[in-house]
């Protein structure tokens, strides 16, 4: 459905302009507003009785955090948007774009991630820059710049080899930006007392400032005693490495994987110490003080923060919260957490992309790895998992090297797709996801190494190095097509789930005030991690939220892979805290 598009941008004098465009791109009218009037305008245009967030226009703006954060704080939500910054990043690299010169010339739109307004310096908050100006890491926010960029993007998509796929990717990426802003605004319900209990159980009671927790002190003493060095600093890799060498432990680094290969009385307590140190540094008491306010952890999500389209986070480690701390993610009283993750998302996406009927049959209605065992390729689930991961990530040695050739015989279409992507990468070519996000091109240094390695007087060692970095790039492109398409499926899942949750009624007797005015009386997304979502829902909406999650997953599969037999089963739980059934 092609919608009215409302392009938002700044005007001289600190006011805001909104230009309405019909589906053909013709400007119908233009409004001038004060900044504080924008939420009311969005609310007015989003009104569709009985069906919120589904009947309004598509809002077009420079980047979602700049415009949407203040709207959310007013208790208003936008249904759909087009994020010019995110879509520009996709189009300037996409192989589907046949005439990219126009887009690539608009270098003002080539920026890093933009974070929510309250996380920026005070002098760079919303609306306080002159129209047309942009600070470090920002894009042009004025109306004329937005209209010009939208026109460029319309031309790039319209003349591409597959406009339908690029339009779907632009819509999904922009929907992800809305979800990210809304999850930041609503926050993740976080139980500080439970977090403190977990830390105290693992590390000992919270120490005085500048002191190490008691359990770490005890374990550090074990390590020093085993090394015979009572003063060595375990937190200084160079000093620790020298102490290890003096104790006869021949390692090149202090990394966990290398230490775990060694046999020495110091190794086991040292690995324990490193685990405790990571917990303290990444998610200890300082993390609580910095990131949790009024019972909410509000991560800064960055949609498209990874080149494959996966999300990243800016501080707080939202995408690396250890399972150990999951019980601290706890619903408000009278509310529930509805969590779901997709079983083997990337292999299922591969089967759907490749149209591999044998792999689809192995996954149908069951654990994919168990299905591979049943097909006779391997004898254990672990072997099946190792083989599939080797296929996705280019494993060529050990168990992967032994099992992957069997997968080529049994699943030729799926294996042919990733093998072809790897071969393209090794030649220096680019590959694309299902909807058209393309891999970054090989840089000039990579190409120079490949060219110089095969000159008549080249050192043979240069040839081997060139082949190694070519294989590395092949492993990257092999995984890019699958991981990037899985990210697209997840965006479609998120977008569909967001709209389904918005259709649930606002409840007068359910209140989670810390979630903010837009989400305090209705089920809403609280967390997303690649193939997992968590919805924070009033208890009476928990079952409906679970159904919405299932329906959105089914719809995402049908949207990307219409008619495919591949299913995307969910492991779904309703509980008062994450990780508890």
Image: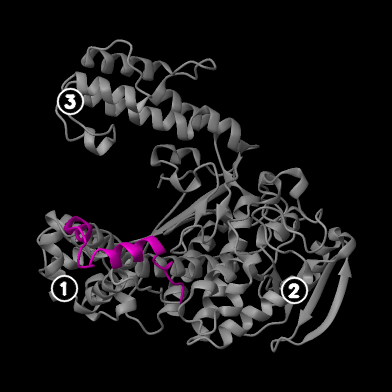
Is 172 placed left or right of 60 in the picture? left
Name the N-terminal-most of marks 2 and 1.
Answer: 2
For the view shown, which residue lies furthest in the top direction? 230
Q: Residues within 10 Å of mark 3 (few under 14, many from 20)?
A: some
Please state the extent of the stretch shown in magenta in the rendering.
436-464
Q: Confirm whether the magenta stretch covers residue 21.
A: no
On the image, which quarter does residue 302 sit in?
A: bottom right
Q: Residues within 10 Å of mark 2 (few under 14, many from 20)?
A: many
Q: Which of 419 and 57 is in front in this view?
A: 419
Name the N-terminal-most of marks 1 and 3.
Answer: 3
Disc 1 designates what residue? Answer: 408
Mark 2 vs 1: CB contact within 8 A? no
Its colouring scheme is: one colour
Disc 3 designates what residue? Answer: 249
Q: What element carries label 2?
A: strand
Residue shown at the point (35%, 62%) measured from the top left: 446
């Amino acid at each position: 459905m092609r919608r009215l598009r409302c392009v938002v941008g700044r005007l001289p004098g600190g006011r805001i302009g909104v230009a309405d465009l019909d589906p053909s791109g013709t400007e119908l009218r233009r409004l001038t507003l004060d900044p504080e009037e924008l939420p009311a305008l969005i609310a007015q245009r989003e009104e569709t009785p009985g069906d919120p967030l589904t009947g309004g226009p598509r809002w077009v703006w420079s980047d979602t955090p700049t415009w949407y954060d203040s709207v959310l704080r007013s208790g208003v939500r936008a249904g759909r948007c087009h994020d010019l910054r995110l879509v520009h990043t996709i189009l300037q690299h996409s192989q589907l774009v046949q005439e990219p010169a126009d887009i690539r010339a608009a270098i003002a739109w080539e920026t890093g991630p933009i974070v929510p307004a309250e996380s920026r310096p005070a002098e760079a908050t919303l609306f306080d820059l002159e129209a047309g100006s942009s600070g470090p890491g920002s894009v042009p926010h004025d109306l004329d710049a937005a209209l010009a960029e939208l026109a460029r993007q319309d031309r790039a998509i319209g003349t591409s080899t597959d406009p339908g796929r690029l339009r779907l990717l632009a819509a999904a990426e922009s929907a992800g930006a809305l979800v990210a802003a809304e999850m930041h605004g609503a926050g993740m319900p976080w139980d500080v007392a439970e977090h403190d209990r977990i830390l105290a159980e693992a590390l000992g009671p919270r120490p005085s400032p500048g002191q190490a927790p008691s359990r770490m002190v005890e374990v550090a003493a074990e390590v020093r005693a085993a090394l015979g060095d009572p003063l060595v600093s375990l937190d200084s890799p160079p000093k620790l490495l020298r102490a290890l060498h003096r104790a006869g432990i021949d390692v090149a680094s202090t990394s966990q994987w290398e230490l775990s290969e060694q046999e020495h009385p110091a190794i086991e307590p040292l690995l324990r110490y490193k685990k405790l140190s990571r917990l303290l540094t990444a998610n200890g008491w300082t993390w609580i003080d910095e990131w949790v306010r009024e019972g909410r952890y509000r991560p800064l999500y960055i949609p498209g923060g990874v080149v494959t389209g996966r999300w990243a986070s800016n501080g707080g480690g939202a995408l690396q919260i250890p399972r150990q701390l999951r019980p601290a993610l706890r619903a408000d009283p009278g509310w529930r957490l509805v969590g779901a993750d997709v079983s083997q998302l990337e292999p299922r996406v591969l089967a759907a992309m490749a149209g591999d009927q044998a792999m689809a049959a192995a996954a149908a209605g069951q654990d994919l790895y168990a299905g591979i065992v049943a097909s006779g390729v391997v004898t254990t689930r672990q072997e099946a998992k190792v083989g599939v991961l080797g296929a996705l990530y280019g494993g060529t040695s050990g168990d992967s090297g032994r099992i992957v050739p069997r997968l080529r015989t049994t699943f030729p279409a799926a294996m042919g797709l990733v093998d072809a992507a790897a071969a393209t990468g090794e030649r220096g070519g680019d590959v694309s996801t299902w909807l058209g996000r393309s891999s970054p091109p090989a840089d000039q240094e990579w190409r120079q190494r490949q060219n110089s390695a095969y000159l008549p007087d080249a050192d043979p060692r240069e040839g081997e190095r060139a082949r190694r970095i070519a294989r590395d790039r092949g492993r990257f492109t092999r995984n890019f097509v699958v991981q990037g398409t899985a990210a697209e499926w997840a965006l479609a899942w998120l977008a569909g789930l967001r709209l389904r949750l918005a259709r649930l009624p606002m409840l007068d007797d359910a209140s989670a005030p810390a979630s903010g005015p837009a989400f305090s009386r209705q089920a809403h997304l609280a967390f997303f991690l690649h193939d997992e979502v968590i919805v924070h829902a009033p208890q009476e909406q928990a079952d409906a939220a679970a159904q919405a999650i299932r329906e959105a997953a089914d719809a995402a599969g049908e949207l990307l892979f219409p008619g495919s037999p591949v299913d995307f089963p969910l492991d779904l739980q309703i509980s008062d805290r994450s990780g508890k059934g």
